[in-house]
Amino acid sequence: MMSDYLVLIGLALVMGMTLVLPFSVKRVEEDLEAFLFVMGLSAVSISGLWSMHLIGEAFREPIPITLTVAAVGLIFRKVRSHLSHWVHTLTKKLGVSAAIFVIVAALGLGSSFLTAIVSAIILAEVISILKFDRAYEIRLTVLACYAIGLGAALTPLGEPLSTIVVAKLKAPPHNADFFYLLKEVGEWIIPGVLLCAALAARGAKAAFSDKRGLQEDAHDSLKVVLVRAGKVYIFVMALIFLGAGLTPLAERYMVSLPTWLLYWVNSVSAILDNATLAAAEITPAMTDRQVTFVLMGLLISGGMLIPGNIPNIISSAKLGIKSKEWAKSALPFGAALMAAYFVLLMLLVK
């Protein structure tokens, strides 16, 4: 059994590689699920926390989100031909601005059950249907992805981050259940989703254009839907192993950080997948206040750059949005949102 000192050094190296390599090594970025799986196995082995309970949890916890991704993906393949009619009907009845508000709000709040992945796929299709100038369509995509990234955290079905958090906090003292995140951060997330929808609706009417805007790269085949679901399963399993293995490091250092510092430290989520950071940071030893600060820091900063969360990655890839284009639109809004939420959280969360 390695000494505590060597264990912490080993876990620090695993965490460092997990945070740096996906951003700096293209092969790791392309095969992220396999990389995280190896890192998760390494972390559990170094910490000596292997158990049948952990193995069972790792196989069991990804099932709901995986089945949801597969089922909704298959259903969407059947109804997507009708989507254009629905979008144009909604726009005609409500007007362009109101229709955009409803679409973004529905995708944001609905992502907690549709999953962030499916909501992002629908978003890409809607953007392809609508005819706006490119600059507005990029802003619309960014704001909609902020809304989806926030809303998906309301239930453990929404995205890997929420699945991981609920799995890690389901034991005492938090006793996290299906509605834990809705109760814990819902009052912060829902207004954020509606704000994104309102800002997305601004300027919609003036941005109408006859020119070809953003277009999807391709429709999803049956194989693509099933492969995506399989990758989600491996991704969530890897994060469960990683989170369990890094627990000694998180309990020793993360819990001791001031709550306000936890919030700002998680601005690194702009360049790193926020589910990975949640797996590394969240621990049952945290207070509800710390959990709230950590989650909101991760969720908001996760929208700033393309690698930050799942809807950013899917939407930018399917619509051909470049990293600089994304950052130009997303960074100013994200920075302002981070600052505003920080002030409100410090004042109101006790």
Image (cartoon, rainbow, N blue to C red):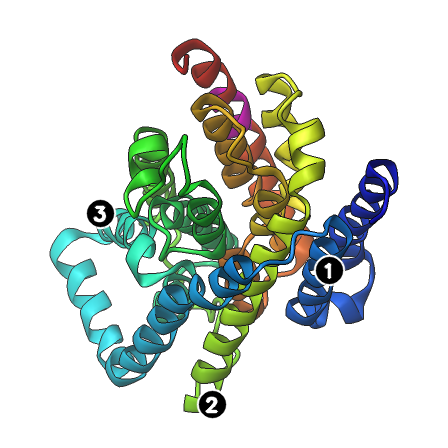
**What whole-number distance in Å separates the C-alpha atoms at marks 2 and 3?**
36 Å
Could you say which is closer to the camera, residue 349 or residue 142? 349
Q: List x then y, in percent, for residue 340.
A: 48, 21
Disc with the residue nearer the chain's start (2 vs 3): 3
Kindly state the secondary structure of the residue where label 1 is placed.
helix
| Dominant secondary structure, magenta | helix
Q: What residue would you read off at disc 1?
A: 39
Residue sitting at the far front: 1
Dot 2 falls on a residue whose secondary structure is helix
Residue 127: tell me if it is visible: no
In x, y percent, where is residue 43? 73, 54
Range drawn in magenta: 336-341
* Mark 3 residue crowding within 10 angstroms, few (<14) / some (14–19) / many (20+): some
Element at label 3: helix
Looking at the picture, which amino acid does disc 3 mark?
Ala
Q: Quadrant of residue 55?
A: bottom right
Give the residue at mark 2: 223
> How many C-alpha atoms fall within 10 Å of the one at disc 2: few (<14), some, or many (≥20)?
few
Alpha-carbon neighbours of circle 1 within 10 Å: few (<14), some, or many (≥20)?
many
Which numbered disc flags the more N-terminal residue, 2 or 1? 1
Q: Position of residue 18 (x, y in %)?
A: 74, 53
Q: Nearer the viewer, residue 139 or 252?
A: 252
Would you name the residue on which mark 3 appears? Answer: 98
User: Please, which residue is most extreme toward the left here?
Assistant: 93
The span from disc 2 to disc 1 (Cα, nearest Å) is: 27 Å
The alpha-carbon separation of the residues under discs 1 and 3 comes to 45 Å
339 inside magenta stretch: yes
- Give x and y (percent) for residue 232: 50, 69
The residue at the point 51 percent across, 54 percent down is 138
